Image (cartoon, rainbow, N blue to C red):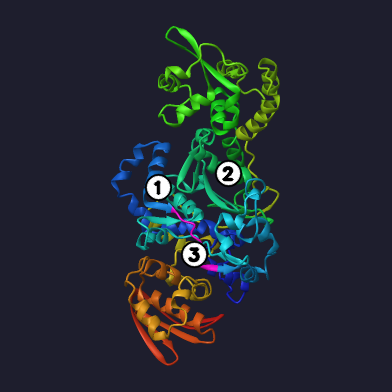
Amino acid sequence: MTANISPDFSDKKTLEKYSSAYTLSDMEIFIFPDLFYPLVLANIMSPVIWRWRDDPWFSEMHRKNFISRSNRIKQYIIDNYIFNLDLETWGLTEKEKEKARFSDFFDTELLSQANALFGYEGDRYYFSIDIRRHFGLDKYDSSVIPYWKTETVEAMTAFRHREHFTTGAGECVSLAALYAAAMFIVGGISLEKIYMMATPLHSQNYIDEKDGLLTNNRRIMTRNMWFNGTSLSGKARRALENEKVTIVSHISGHIHTVYPRATINREAYLSFTDKLNDFVKTSLTPVIFINFLRFKQEYKCLFQYNYKRTGSIHYITLEKLFEYEHSSKSSMNEETRDKLLAEVDNEEFFPDPVPGKIMLNDVESFLKKRKNTDLEVIEAEFKKLFPTEHNDCVNRMFTDIKEFTVTEPRLPLPDRDFVTEITPDISVNDSRDDIIRKIRDLSGISEMALLTLYAYRDMERSDWKPFIKAAIERNPVCHTPLSGKTADEIFGIIGSLKNKSIYDSGRMAQPDEVWNFGRGDGAEKAFLMADVILYNDPEATVTVSIADSSVTLDYQGREYHFPSSKGLTVRAIIRWGDYSTH
């Protein structure tokens, strides 16, 4: 018999997890990986992405193939959302304060090993840079870290209301969750095929369709793009090349690098690991070799190319050909090479071979005959067939070729205790109403479904205590601008904000969302005011009463009134660390 889910909010870990569903910071998702996929489901419940399907840009999507649909989604996201990792968007906190939140139920030293905010530097690329300087944290005390909150699709879209923003915005986890929801709603990809991966410094998705696809911030990468040697692909490869994957999340559950218990379907996870490993591995072909030389420019100097023009063979260095490629629509890839060569000025060619350089034509012929040959065998034969005085350079080149052609993702090992949990059974053929009904109906027996309602901000079906705890304790953006002001002054400033919520009926924005986007329902404004009052006066008691269309905040015997259209009813007595509701 399936047990009902009934969170015990007297338990510190439970309260922290459910309150984290409202703030969803990177560190909170690391501690509570079961929050990762509920954000995707909350975005799927939201009306925002469903409205995309009415945009002419997505017309006739059912007639398009997988890559065409993916490119449509990619371009829409590029046009409407920018990547934002501003340190002060969601305010600042301190390492010691955050560690204290989790210390009773988590070994916080593990945070230092696997989270960038707590000292992680990676294994190669990130070890060579100053992480705090890289993120602009060097101007603060060494204990200061940002709240990098993962935005819901509503919050991402609302960035267009902020000064200096003309579109929506979000950080990498937000964009990964947005992509996953969009691929399901607009792209028609089942959730069973969408895997989310978190590393200490990044988040991206693997879509198990056709030859596979990676979503990376606002971009997508096909398997061919992974090996095309461009700087954009190089940046996209960086996380899987240099960082451990700490979490893999899926509609069936998750697996975490720290926890011995995994809820993801074991067969699905093993299939995912096999397919991801195949995605980032290739044999050395002529095409891949050219792409490698584009990626690692220091080896172009080893080669020249011969080309028949005006009736005779001419020669040109590879450095010069790639130089022309930079300013051309054509490339050194075989299908456009002739067009590129036609653009080269006559004086760039030599009538005789350039001494000391290997003929690329011969290398390509050599590689064509050795399809699927082991790289060590190719290296040994290459050195015999193409002797050069630059042996050290050739040795380094093959070391780099191996890294270029074979990435070994460091995924959580499958030596876990796999347990099965109840998760929503959602189909691409379901309507939004169907999905909302399924998740709500399942929330009594499925924690994934229940956490989804919290991430969705469904206040009619959620306990208010986690919401209030998050609102008072983890919304610092408004503190500095409203510090030291009287309650009347605070009320005047907050009251002047636009009376419009970024969420639809029955759902609530957190105070930092109200402040950042300059708008909110009266119920949301009341909690923003309570947050600021308790920051200015930590010993205060504030009462917020919501009764359908009327909201009253009581502080020191004074009442402050706000209008509301949320249709909610609650009475909250708020003291720092003590949040009771009636």
Q: Is residue 380 above or below residue 403?
A: above
Q: Is residue 177 above or below residue 329?
A: below
Mark sitting earlier along the chain (2/3): 3
Please identify the residue farthest to the left as the structure is shown: 56
Q: Amino acid at mark 1?
A: Ile
The segment highlighted magenta reads 83-92
Q: Residue at x 44, y 20 (%)?
A: 341
Mark whose residue sits in front, 2 or 3: 3
Determine if the magenta segment contains residue 84. Answer: yes
Magenta stretch prevailing secondary structure:
loop
Q: Which mark is residue 238?
A: 2
Real-space Cα separation, disc 2 to disc 1, in angstroms: 20 Å
Q: Is residue 5 visible?
A: no
Q: Which mark is residue 88?
A: 3
Viewer-proximal residue, 451 or 108? 108
Q: Residues within 10 Å of mark 1 (few under 14, many from 20)?
A: some
Percent across and percent down for residue 404 are: 61, 34
